[in-house]
Amino acid sequence: MGAAENIEEQKDTLQLFIHILQQGDIDQIEHQLEEMHPAEIAHLLESLPTDQRHAVWEHVPAEMEGEVLTNVNEDVRAALIERMDSSQLLAATETLDTDDLADILPEMPQDVIQELLLTMEQQDRDRLRSALSFDEDSAGGLMNLDAVMVRAGLSLDVVQRYLRRRGEIPEGTDNLYVVDRENHYIGSLPLITLLTRDPSELVEDVMLKGEEAISAETPARDVALRFKQRDLISAPVVDVNGILLGRITIDDVVDVIIDDAEHSLMSMAGMNEEEDMFAPIITSTKRRAIWLGINLLTALLAAWVIGQFENTIQKLVALAVLMPIVTSMGGIAGTQTLTLMIRGIALGQISSSNARRLLNKEIWVSAWNGLLWAVVIGSIAYFWFGNSKLGLVIGAAIILNLLLAALAGATVPLLLRRIGADPALGGSVVLTTITDVMGFFMFLGLATIFLI
């Protein structure tokens, strides 16, 4: 099923549930939920207003509640957990894998956490503590702790008998991981190799030895990039001493890619990808007010610059008509470069060795575009107001602002990254401030010099 068909199916499901809720058909709600995957239920809950969401949540099958909680965003999860008592939370989490439990455990009430830990076996408790010790946006935070380990000196026949005794292997397993007696990672044994080679052969003779493990401290974004570049389905995770800790599977990486895309999109508006779309009005108002306040400061700065040229504008009203064109063109050009840079940074394609060449390229692109649109806009200004000097002034301002926009769009994200800030979050605000303030200053300054 393609992406478009999947979206349409989700829309149909949402409409169906809204209709069923309006009718109050509880049996139909429960029937539909039983037929759905936990991830689909999570998407449905995120798409419903708060009252309807709670009505549906009451009828989610108990055995699915834990999986649903791991799939909804943080705001929705917190609201659902708040409505559950201790016994419900314990029942919902008892079937979760350790890595999934680690994702939601920090949001649960302290008494439930304590009771949950007491009910776990020592081995599972140690695994959970290990998972919680890593940042959630690192390889250690992404990994599953269910990697199947074998020794290099075993024959393939012995490994096969070992797997048969286990009775099952973890979901998404494509490789077994070869370790020494201290559990140091040595290599991997693909299942296809295990099944197709002579059972009498030894693991050490057929295993893949060149597969580099991922350090537990590796950022999640870098993990996703490695999976993309090497077409991986899974990868081993090791600590600083090379001891195998677990594995990362492609489904975890897909989540990282989607979350990263949502983060970049929402951050450019000063919002959080984990925010509940139907959060209370006061909550959403407070969150957005901060960003609006920041933008107000940049707008006041631009207004102050305009105010410095009040006499110039009064003498030539056409300037007030044309000012937005200069800043708008600069803003668009700068955003194009900024977006290119943020994407390059995210994909690891930009470093100190090639940043200067990319900057030069973007400046030349803006220079040529500046010349093209300076002629177009200057001609429009001349025929509109019958003033050739006005056409030359706005043309010059367009060229200068596009060049400045390219410079800002290329350097701002690099500078933000250097100081540890998120380029997607702060880049657009800084860029807009530069192109607006300097665009007004250059246009009105040139007009003051040559027209007044």
Image (tube, rainbow, N blue to C red):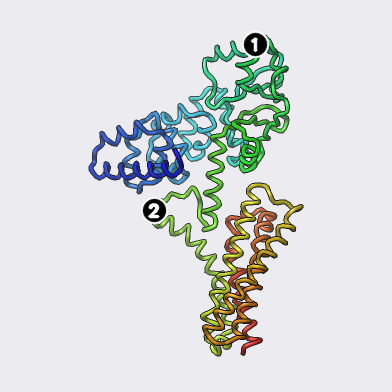
In the rendered view, would you say 419 is above or below 432?
Answer: above
Identity of the residue drawn at 55% across and 87% down:
386
Q: Which residue is mark 2?
A: 280
Q: Residues within 10 Å of mark 1 (few under 14, many from 20)?
A: some
Q: Residues within 10 Å of mark 2 (few under 14, many from 20)?
A: few
Q: Amino acid under label 2?
A: Pro
Q: Residue furthest right?
A: 353
In the rendered view, would you say 156 is above or below 319?
Answer: above
Q: Secondary structure at mark 2?
A: loop
Q: Position of residue 72 (x, y in %)?
A: 45, 41
What is the quadrant of the C terminus in the image? bottom right
Q: Which is nearer the N-term, disc 1 or disc 2?
A: 1
Q: Is residue 245 left or right of residue 324?
A: right
In the rendered view, would you say 267 is above or below 408?
Answer: above
Nearest to the observer: residue 256 or residue 97 = 256
Q: Amino acid under label 1?
A: Pro
Q: Which residue is mark 1?
A: 199
Identity of the residue drawn at 62% across and 33% down:
232
Q: Position of residue 255 (x, y in %)?
A: 53, 40
Nearest to the observer: residue 354 or residue 369 = 369
Identity of the residue drawn at 57% across and 87% down:
387
